[in-house]
Image (cartoon, rainbow, N blue to C red):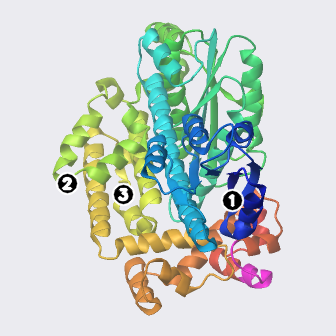
Amino acid sequence: MFTVFIVEDEQLIRDGMLKLVEWQQLGFEVVGQAADGELAWPMIQELQPDIVITDIRMPFMDGLSLSRIIKQHYPKTKIIILSGYDEFEYAQKAINIGVEHYVLKPITKAQLTDLLVRIREEKVKMVEQEASLALLHQEAFNQKRRLFFEQLLIDSREVLDLIEQANHLKLDLLKDHYKLLLIMIQPKDPGFLADFSWKIIERIRGEMIEKLTTIPGLFEYKSSNELTVFLLAADEEIQERAFEAEFKILSFFEQEYDDLVFLIGTTNSFNRLSEVSEYYNIGRNRLLEQWWRIKTNQINYSYNPPRINSVLKIEKQGEIVRELRAIETHKETFSHGKKLGEELDHELDFLSFEKIPVEWTDSKVLTDFILDGRIEDIPSFIERILSDVSETQWQSQAFVQYMFLSSYMALQVFIQALDRDLNKDLDQAIKLPVAFEQEPSKQLLESYLEEALGNVLVAHRQKTKSRYYNVIKEASAYIYEHFGDVDLRLNDIADSVNISPAHFTTIFSQETGKTVTEFITEVRMGEARILLRTTNQTHYEIALAVGYRDVSYFSRLFKRHHNVSPGKYRKGVI
């Protein structure tokens, strides 16, 4: 609804104008009126109407003077000048001021209606353009912030440079104390059902970020490898704020998510902004090392919502390294030297994770290559991302095994994000070699990467070159957006991509290997899994939320799809 203010010195004309058109039906509301410009101006300042309709000849302050002052203070306000004089001089002055519409009296209902409709369309278009521009500016600003935090966490920078950039981005980071909180959430297993685990993860992360960034001095950075980092900056009470943040993080995991692995780590507090990257690298790699041990069954991970005192604490490792090296030098002198040596080897193997290259912890590196790279570029790409690995690290069996698993998970992220309907084929294309557990080596890793990257890149290229790739992609997006509609029909989906229902059914089956109904059911059952595990909604409410009016039919379909009833699934029987 757009607002209108009328300025006219004759009451009879003002009253007539109010009755001349159906303001509400046209999308307008007359919010005020005045007899001249002098009386109108204070009211216009208070009301700030979208449109001002004013007579040109009035006592005290005429329409041209009023228009001039309005345009100076509110340039977006549309002005319609009504004049009884068909003189070029008046029209020219109005145009010079910035008045959009100069109309001769008397104005008819049809003329005013047509003019208001045109102004409404102009305003709507302007509002849409401003909203779009504001969104672009906000996205650009957010991107600058993300790049700033990425550089802050990964690269050591001059403090003055950091402070200047932070101030430019309206980030109050110059504090006495700093602390990092790192959260990693991963699906327990890849495969078909992992797609729905990623949806849960994104939901948790979004809610967590929204909740935690209300804490003063807490800033968020979401990495593309499902690692969320919070930087806490405070002059005092940093421990209390950190405790509050940890408590809020843990509150998201009061309910069991047995499909997920959840890890949280916090650093000790430190007092230099330039040390952020050092603490981040240590913390990131500690979490990755824990995740790797879970994936290789060195740690028996059963989901139990952790308590505050069980949060993984992260601190600098320099002293630990020196102590372990000293023990290594003298370990033969101890009577229990063999046992101590085994413990030492384990600890030193753990410390090889301290210098993991970023490429192995950020799925974006591989994703970017798959999107833009070429088959012939694969060898040079592999050589580049392996160039930072030291000879000492190559000698660590655990470290090389981790690199295999990390590569595999990064490729899984790409598959889940971009090629839902190719999951089964691509899972085979990136399958880890059996030998990676017994005899991991640089040569085996290079061979695996070359073959896996080649397979995924070729599969993705073939998919995107498909004649109907965009059609299927748009139709799938429509289904994901509307699957909760109980009246969702094939015709609606086909209309969304401008194809006849019969033709759409054929190409959808050809391209995806499943019918439209099977795909919709798959999406609905996946969402039902999420709601059963993450909400307290009744089965009827969940059935309705995923597009079924009949809860009995929903239950039968769920059992047929997952081989377990909704009730048992909610209790964790799967």
Residue 186 higher or lower than 216, as above or below: below
Disc 1 target residue: 1
First reached walking from the N terminus: tag 2 or tag 3? 2
Per the image, label 3 sits on a secondary structure element best described as loop
- Residue 246 appears left or right of 158: right
Marks 2/1: CA distance? 56 Å
Q: Report x, y in % for residue 325.
A: 45, 11
The quarter of the picture where the N terminus appears is: bottom right
Q: Residue at x 52, y 80 (%)?
A: 493
> Looking at numbered disc 1 in the image, what kind of residue is underneath it?
Met
Who is closer to the viewer here, 321 or 182?
Answer: 182
Disc 3 target residue: 430
User: Visible in this render: residue 336?
Assistant: yes
Per the image, label 1 sits on a secondary structure element best described as loop
The quarter of the picture where the C terminus appears is: bottom right
- Which contiguous range is marked in magenta? 546-556
Q: Are marks 2 and 3 in contact (CB under 8 Å)?
A: no
